[in-house]
Amino acid sequence: MIKSIKLDQERIAAAIADDLLLSSNAVTVLKKRYLRRDERGAVAETSKEMFERVAAHVSRAEIKYGGDAKICRSKFLTMMCSLEFLPNSPTLMNAGLPLGQLSACFVLPVEDSLSAIFEALKSMALIHQSGGGTGFSFSRLRPKNDVVRATGGVASGPVSFMRIFDTATDVIKQGGRRRGANIATLRVDHPDILGFIQAKEKPGFLENFNISVAATDEFMRRARQGCDMDLINPRTGQVAGHINAAETMDCIANSAWRGGDPGMIFIDRINAAHPLPSLIESTNPCGEQPLLSYESCNLGSINLAKLVERGEMNWERLMELVSLAVRFLDDVIEMNCYPLQQIEETTLQSRKIGLGVMGFAEMLIRMNISYNSQEAVRVAEGIMKFIAERAREQSARLGEERGSFPLFEESKLKNWSAMRNATVTTIAPTGTISIIAGTSSGIEPLFALAFVRRVLEGARLLEVSPLFEDAAVARGIYTPELRAELARKGSAADIAGVPQDLKDLFVTALDIPPQQHVRIQAAFQKYTDNAVSKTVNLPESATVDDVLKVYNLAYDLGCKGVTVFRYGCRCQVLYLGNGETVPGCKYCG
C-alpha cells in the first residue's frame, strides 16, 4: 500500500511538470496553492486534471439554459490547457471541490456601530477562508474623539478599527494557500484623513492592508488651486474642520514616496462611469474592481502573448477567446457557492464580470514594439477596444438567451435590447496566474530581465526572461559574463555589448519613465468598464515631486486610480538581482 501511494505521488509529480510543459516556477506555485490535495495533505492531481476539474464544474451551468455542457467543457478546457485564458485563483482552487467559492473580489460595508463593525469582521473572515479578498470603506465611521452617546465616551476612529481587521486577517490563511488581502479606503474629506494617510508608516502596522484615499473631483481641483476644503463628520453631516487640499496632496505623495501607501482612487470618476445608480465607496484589494457593498466579482484574463503569430495579433482567435471567456465567467456566477446569502443576492442583481489580459509586455516584444513608445500606447488602446466591444456583444447575446441582469432597466445600458452583465471588463494584476501561464503579469512591463520573486511561505523564485535569452543567443552575444551581469543588474540598459535595439525592446519597469506607465494605464482604462491594476514604478532616486506629477497626469488622462511604488522603499515582492543569489541558480554563478 505504501509503495502504491509513493508511485502515485511520483506519477503526479512528473505529470505536473510534463503534461502541459509548464515552467519550474509554475509547478512550484501550482503545488503550493492550487492543486487538489488528499486527506493526508498530499497533492492529488496534475495541472491538466486541475483544469479538467474546473472546466467540468463551470460548464454544468450550460444545462440550466439548454446549452451543450459537453461542448463548452471541451472548449473551456482547451483555452485553459493552452494557457490562452485563466480565471482568477479561487476558481482554479475551489471549482468542483466542497468549498466551491469561485470569486476573487468582494466589498463589505462598515457601518457606524460596534455591532455592524464586528459583523463586517465576521463576514471578512468567511470570505478570506474561502479564498477571496475584501475591500472596505471606513468613511462612515465617526472620527477619533467624536462623541459616543451610548457610553458617554469618545470614538477611537477608523484607523483603530482597521487594526482589528488587520489582526484577524493575520490569523486566517485562506485555506492555508492564499493569505488574506484587504484594502481600506477613506474619503479625503473625512476628519481623520491625515492619520489615515500616514497609518502605514509605522513598521509592522496594517501589513495585511493596502490603503487608498478616495479623492473627489473637488479635492483635485482645490489641490491645484491651493485652496482649503471642508472636513465632514459622517455622523452629523456637519463641517468639522478644514484642511488645505494642496498640503494634503503633498502628505499623500510623501507617504507614498516613503512606503508605497496610500494609493489614490478617483471616486467621483468611478461613480460617473458606474452603470448602476447606487454609489460605490470602495474596491477590491488591488483597486481594479470597484464594487457596491456585498457585491462580488469573478475575473479572468486572456494571455495576449499566446496570440501573436509571426509578429502579428491573431484577431480571429482573440475574438473567439473573448466570447468564450465571457460565457465562462457568466457560468461561474451560476456555479459559485457564495460565502454569505446577502453577497449572493447582491451579486446576482448585477452579475458583474471582469475580463482582462495578461502577457501584454511579452506580446509587445513578440511584435517588436518597445513598451516605452507611442506605438505601445496605440496598440494598448486598440487591443482593449477590440476586447471591450466583443465582450459587450457576447454579454448582449447571453442576455437574449438567458435574460438580462435584474437591474438592467435601472442601468445606463438600456440602449441595448438585452445585457447579461452590468460590467464585462477589468484589468487585474494576474500575479500568480501569470506565473502559471509563463508570461508577464497583467499590463505591466517586464519588471526586470532577471529578478527574484517572493511567494508563499518565504520561497524565492528566480525569473529570467526567456525572450531575452533567445534574442541574445540569436545575436551571438549570450555569454556566461552577460548572464552573470544580467542577474546582478536586472536590466540590459547599462550592459556593454548589448545592441541598442535590444535595450529598447527589452526595456524594464524602472527604465521606463513614470509618464509612460501612466499613459499605458490610461490607454487600457479608456475601454475598461471597471478599473485597471497598474503600478507606476519609480526608481529609488525619484522625488516626492515626481509622485505628485504622476497623480496629476493619471487624473488628467482619465484613470480611475493610481498607485506608485519607489523601488526599495519598503519590503516588496519583486527584487532586482543586485548580487543576491539563489541556491542552484545557473545565472548567479
Image: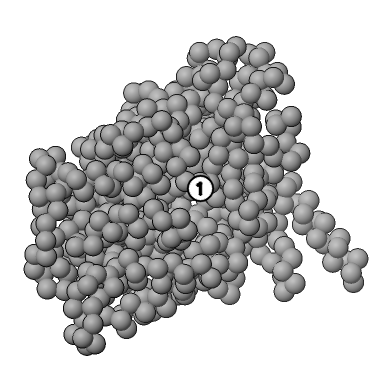
Percent of width and height locating residue 412: 18, 56
Q: How many marks?
A: 1
Percent of width and height locating residue 27: 68, 49
Compared with 234, 452 (above or below) is: above
State the image quarter where residue 220 is shown: top left
Give the colour scheme shown.
one colour
Percent of width and height locating residue 154: 23, 78
Please state if 2 lies on the left or on the right of 86 as rendered: right
Front residue of this view, candidates 557 and 452: 452
Percent of width and height locating residue 169: 48, 68
Residue at the image point whose x is 14% and y is 53% from the top: 243
Residue 318 visible to the viewer:
no
**Farthest residue in the bottom direction?**
150
Please state if 466 lies on the left or on the right of 288 as rendered: right
Please state if 291 lies on the left or on the right of 539 as rendered: left
Front residue of this view, candidates 507 and 242: 242
Please state if 185 lies on the left or on the right of 18 as rendered: left
Q: Quadrant of the C terminus?
A: top right
**Label 1 Cα neighbours within 10 Å, binned few <14 / some 14-19 / many ≥20:** few
Residue at the image point whose x is 80% and y is 60% from the top: 9
Secondary structure beneath label 1: loop
Residue 469 visible to the viewer:
yes
Front residue of this view, candidates 298 and 76: 298
Residue at the image point whose x is 40% and y is 47% from the top: 259
Front residue of this view, candidates 145 and 321: 145
Compared with 72, 446 (above or below) is: above
Q: Quadrant of the N terminus?
A: bottom right
Residue at the image point whose x is 45% and y is 55% from the top: 203
- Residue type, numbered disc 1: Cys
Q: Which residue is mark 1?
A: 571
